[in-house]
Image (spheres, helix red, strand yellow):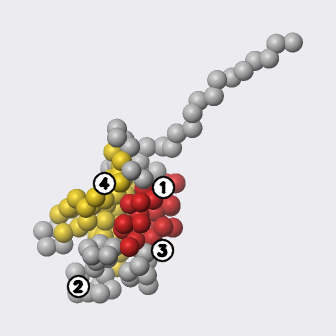
Amino acid sequence: MAQSFQKQTPVRLPPHPNDLDRKRIERALKARKRYRYVSPSVSTVVRGYQIVSPCCSRNIDPDGGSIDVARLLHDEESGTWQLLRKDHGTNGWEFDSNHTYLSTLLDRLNTDPERIFWQ
């Protein structure tokens, strides 16, 4: 009796953005060091994710509205992540750092020792 074997295709995560990683980012943000009393939201953008949060400090928005915190962009070719921060003065995005893993990017964002993301 001959056995038939099916070739298995490797399991690949869907390209970014995807709902699995969006939820992973949302969960990871609960471990941040700053502004733990606000609830940031994670939305999808081309090649990644954007984090928006209420501005409770009123440093950026005196009315306490939602402000852009960070963008997380994935480079599919190299497999690396870019972390960008919002320059609220120019209303533009600035490069912060490159990361091999999403987890190390989230560590950087959550720790934020220079207070450049969670303002």
According to the picture, the residue beneath numbered tag 1 turns out to be 21
Determine the residue positioned at 34% across, 79% down. Answer: 54
Res 62 quadrant in image: bottom left
Distance between the alpha carbons at the discs numbered 2 and 3: 22 Å
Determine the residue positioned at 68% across, 23% down. Answer: 6
**Figure check: 78 above or below 72:** above
Determine the residue positioned at 18% across, 69% down. Answer: 87
- Residue lying furthest left: 90
**Figure check: 73 above or below 64:** above
Of 112 and 20, which appears nearest the observer?
112
According to the picture, the residue beneath numbered tag 4 turns out to be 98
Q: Nearer the viewer, mark 2 or mark 3?
A: 3
Left or right of residue 37: residue 64:
left
As drawn, the label of residue 31 is 3
Q: If the image is split into quadrants, where does the C terminus sit?
A: bottom left
Q: Is residue 45 in view from this perspective?
A: no
Distance between the alpha carbons at the discs numbered 1 and 2: 30 Å
Residue 85 percent across, percent down from the top left: 26, 65
Mark sitting earlier along the chain (4/3): 3
- Residue lying furthest top: 1
Residue 22 percent across, percent down from the top left: 46, 58
Which amino acid, mark 2?
Asn
